[in-house]
Image: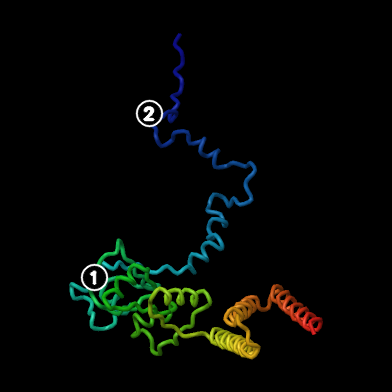
Amino acid sequence: MYKRKSKRRRGRGDKSNAKGIRWKHVHQQAGRYKGPRSRTFEGGKLPLYRRIPKWPDAWLARQRKVLEPLNLAKLRTFIESGRLDTRFTITQRHLNDSRCVKVKNGVSLFNVNDYPFPYKISIEVAGADQSSIDAIRRVGGEVIIVYRNRLNLRAHIKPYKFEVLPKTARPNLEMVHYLEKMRARGCVVKYVKPQWLIDEEKSLKTELAEFEAEALIAKGEAIERGDPDLRESVDDLQQRLLKRFRLRETRAAELLRHQEAGEKDQAAVDEETRE
């Protein structure tokens, strides 16, 4: 009696000939999982919290203004090859048209290892480091820092795309601090002063004029009294006025005024007792 031949089980191994039907039912059951899911699960597609960029990181990254770096050695190469003319002021439009740098947010100069720069030029950029500023000024050139926002820079580089050129934008407080820092480094800074800065400068000039007037009055009174230590008294007065100016509209200023008033009252009492 012969044993019945068993049915061949196909698709049960990696080296099986039936590669298309291998463990097909296992995959079908895995795709029908009915257990607990995460709250963010959306049937296998990318969930909402991963489709949307993170906030505020993504928003801040879009707002961040990164200047295009320009090496002073590359600028020298373009000048020597005749692609930039040193007889006129080199603007960011010239740098973009000559393919020296692709301008998007502005150009920032930098210099590596104090690379020598022998050409006397006048260049307009958005930023520069101290080494490049010194290298250009050493031969009689100048670095001009011009403030332009995104729209003004686009109108500067491609003016033919505008029927009417936009007005020059005014910088905010952070940019004013940056521009004045560049002025202190030795650059020529050009920007339109905002109205709040003009008002602040007027108020500061008025207060300083009042302080100088008080110092002159005190100096005249000291001369009339014949004070031998005149210079020191005037210097002390100026230091006190400067301290009051720095501490204006603060609690420390009120305490300082009360202290000065108390000293004056004590001096009056001493004079009465002396008489």
Residue that carries the numbered disc 1 in the rendered image: 76
Residue drawn at point x = 47 percent, y = 83 percent:
169
Nearest the viewer among 130 and 179 is: 130
Q: Is residue 193 above or below residue 113?
A: below
The answer to whether residue 206 shows anywhere in this view is no
Kindly identify which numbered label has been placed on residue 232. Answer: none
Type of residue at label 2? Answer: Lys
Q: Residue furthest front?
A: 275
Q: Label 2: which residue?
A: 15
Label 1 CA crowd tier, 10 Å (few <14, some 14–19, many 20+): some
Q: Amino acid at mark 1?
A: Arg
| Residue 50 visible to an observer of this rendering | yes
User: Which image quadrant: the N terminus?
Assistant: top left
Q: In front: 21, or 78?
A: 78
- Quadrant of the frame with the C terminus: bottom right
Instruction: Give the residue at x 39% y 69%.
Output: 67
Task: Judge from the rendering whether residue 29 lies leftward or rightward of residue 178; answer left or right.
Answer: right
Q: Is label 2 or label 1 in front?
A: 1
- State the image coordinates of residue 16 (x, y, percent, origin top left): 39, 29
Residue 191 percent coordinates (x, y): 44, 83
Disc 2 element:
loop
Residue in the image at 58% along x and 87% along y: 212
Q: CA distance from mark 2 to mark 1?
A: 67 Å
Does residue 19 appear left or right of residue 232 in this picture?
Answer: left
Residue 39 against residue 175 in the figure, above or below: above
The percent coordinates of residue 159 (x first, y second) are: 35, 84
How many residues crowd around disc 2 within 10 Å: few (fewer than 14), some, or many (20 or more)? few
> How many badges with numbers are in the image?
2
